[in-house]
Image (spheres, helix red, strand yellow):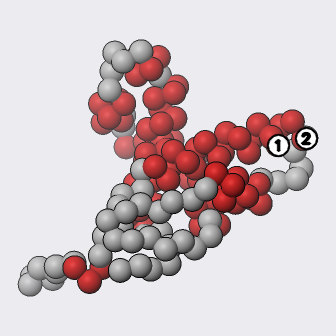
């Protein structure tokens, strides 16, 4: 079954969490050096600390994901976007009020962040195959 790509709330949440863990891993020397697992660091954070990180990234990642073009996603696969599609979506949302060099840096960083998020979107499930328990 193929359907146009519209991210579900679950997919967006998984994508944003994956991007947050990527940022966390880049910020923490102990994770970069392999002394601690990023999932353990994530679990040790308070709910508020996780919220702060997710909130700061959400305004950068979510608008871009919504701006991506519709693509067909076969059941059991993840959505696939070209680097050019991601770059175009980011560039369309980054303001023109930045200097040329700063804008290039922001675009490049945001493209990497969105690609990290997209890598964490779970495979698309078949909505017709969902089983709803009787008690619901």
Question: Separation of disc 1 and disc 2 at Cα?
Answer: 6 Å
Q: Residue at x 47, y 63 (%)?
A: 79
Q: Quadrant of the N terminus?
A: bottom left
Q: Residue at x 16, y 79 (%)?
A: 131
Visible in this render: residue 54? no
Q: Residue at x 36, y 58 (%)?
A: 122
Q: Position of residue 110 (x, y in %)?
A: 66, 45
Checking the image for residue 103, the label placed there is 1
**Residue at label 2?**
99
Visible in this render: residue 79? yes
46 or 6: nearer the viewer: 6
Q: Residue at x 76, y 37 (%)?
A: 105
Q: Quadrant of the C terminus?
A: bottom left
91 or 98: nearer the viewer: 91
Tell me whether circle 1 and circle 2 mark residues in contact (CB < 8 Å): yes
Q: Is residue 38 above or below residue 30?
A: below
Badge 2: few (under 14), some or many (20 or more) residues near its Cα, within 10 Å?
few
Q: Position of residue 80 (x, y in %)?
A: 51, 60
């Amino acid at each position: 079954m193929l359907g146009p790509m519209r991210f579900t709330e679950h997919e967006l949440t998984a994508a944003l969490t994956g991007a947050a863990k990527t940022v966390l891993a880049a910020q923490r020397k102990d994770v970069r050096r392999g002394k601690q697992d990023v999932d353990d660091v994530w679990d040790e954070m308070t709910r508020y600390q996780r919220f702060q990180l997710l909130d700061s990234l959400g305004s950068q990642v979510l608008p871009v994901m919504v701006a991506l073009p519709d693509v067909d996603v076969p059941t059991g696969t993840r959505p696939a976007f070209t680097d050019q599609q991601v770059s175009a979506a980011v560039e369309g949302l980054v303001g023109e009020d930045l200097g040329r060099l700063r804008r290039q840096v922001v675009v490049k960083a945001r493209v990497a962040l969105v690609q990290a998020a997209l890598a964490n979107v779970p495979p698309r499930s078949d909505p017709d195959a969902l089983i709803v328990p009787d008690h619901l």
